[in-house]
Image (cartoon, coloured by chain):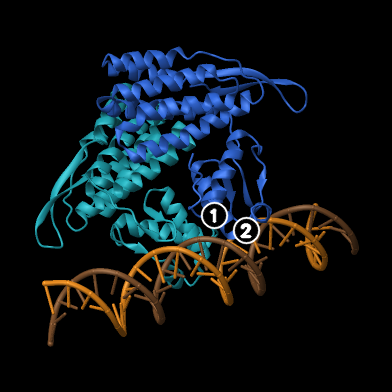
Chain colours: A blue, B cyan, C orange, D brown
Amino acid sequence: MAKGTDDTIAVRIGKVLADRIISGAIEPGARLRQDHVAEEFNTSHVPVREAFRRLEAQGLAVSEPRRGVRVAAFDLGEVKEVAEMRAALEVLALRHAAPHLTSAILDQAEEATKAGDKSRDVRSWEEANRAFHRLILAPCGMPRLLATIDDLHAASARFLFAAWRSEWETRTDQDHRAILSALRQGNTESAAATLGRHVQWIGRKPVRTASGATREAFAIVG
Amino acid sequence: MAKGTDDTIAVRIGKVLADRIISGAIEPGARLRQDHVAEEFNTSHVPVREAFRRLEAQGLAVSEPRRGVRVAAFDLGEVKEVAEMRAALEVLALRHAAPHLTSAILDQAEEATKAGDKSRDVRSWEEANRAFHRLILAPCGMPRLLATIDDLHAASARFLFAAWRSEWETRTDQDHRAILSALRQGNTESAAATLGRHVQWIGRKPVRTASGATREAFAIVG
DNA sequence: AAGGCATAAATTATCTATAATTTTGGATCG
DNA sequence: CGATCCAAAATTATAGATAATTTATGCCTT
């Protein structure tokens, strides 16, 4: 995988921080102090500030003027919101991508599904899942739409990791298979309908809180 | 209108530049040189760069590392793309907003429609149109969705100004009225369907190019 | 509590280095 | 002899580092 060694320091910092926020390595609400980050990356704070702006735009951080920036919090409402946005936009993308889907692409997507089914941890499952969605949507050729969907996927992954950080039991994705089979038959509408339902399926799971009690955690699983 | 005197210089610069790009005061493809902007606003280049990052996220500027940033270009494809995204997302927002719409809000929306019908120039028409959409969608209570829609509105306005910069003939918006009447009757589905069609209506108009020839210009008019 | 001082952190300014673009001088070819 | 192309230097612009300033905040005193 290209490590992007040629892009700017600000971009590099942004990617690393995004990954940490998504994976849950930094907690929601945690403060991001610019000179701490600057020190860690052996830079000044100037590129750090630019990275913060990018995170802000992705919805991963929130900044209050003169008071610093903190990792964005999220609640069940936002999980639902992201799920519905993904449903609306991914269905749109799929409708435009469908005419350009080749069997080669669909085969790759099937591989991604299989990889997901074999995953023993959330991280690799998420990676495979994202690959599946990207493969079938990319041929729509709508860059702005794809960029927005990507940001929503990042948010989804965040919710997922928050709920399933430690334990993850293998699950086989029937929806992905149904979508692929509909696409192979040229039944775009059926594929779109299934996709729309698929990304709105919200998994719930009890997790132990810091105080020892258990609460329900929610995440988009698709 | 709140001038936002308390937000950071970077934010202020970002707003001014965004307005210029949207209004067409700066041409698509034009380079944005950081120290020129810095000089104009009597600041250093640091807040300017942060403003650039914000513009980039909004899709109003594109930046190549070490080569500077330029105003984003756009073509008919992007006009269509934005129209379809707006249709998908505004319909979603309306479905959630509908249960929370009060007659007071609908009256305000009707006022906005009237103001639009009376507008003698694109700028004030656009303002009224945006107010209408925002009024009926805001009660959905989905901040991320609304923020995304806002960015798409900015893009729409850009297309509109590019095509209708000089001449603008008064037009009465039947769609807005149909949407309002459906909403007043509690017929959300009909309102949503009309809204979906409404924002995908793309106006076309011949404009004179720099070389003297005429070409077709396209814009979302809704 | 209310107010003021001290500390810490964010924002912006100034300065430096490095990369990119333009210009210019020369050489080669028609 | 003129034009064109290439190369190297000079200019310009971006990116980043360091320094200064402003703003918020916590603590202490009254």
Q: Position of residue B57 (x, y in %)?
A: 43, 48
Chain letter of disc 1? A
Residue indicated by mark 1: A9
The C terminus of chain B: image quadrant: top left
Mark 1 or 2 closer to N-term? Answer: 1
| The image quarter in which residue A48 lies | bottom right
Which residue is pictured at 27% across the width and 49% down the height?
B74
Which residue is pictured at 47% across the width and 17% down the height?
A114
Residue indicated by mark 2: A43
Chain letter of disc 2? A
| The image quarter in which residue B19 lies | bottom left
Q: Position of residue B83 (x, y in %)?
A: 28, 38
Q: Amino acid at mark 1?
A: Ile
Q: Is residue B151 above or below residue A103?
A: below
| The image quarter in which residue D14 lies | bottom left
Q: Are marks 1 and 2 in contact (CB under 8 Å)?
A: yes
Q: Is residue A2 visible?
A: yes
Determine the secondary structure under disc 2. loop
Mark 1 neighbour density, 10 Å: few (under 14) some (14–19) many (20 or more): some
- Of residues A84 and A9, the one nearer the viewer is A9
- Of residues B207 and A178, the one nearer the viewer is A178
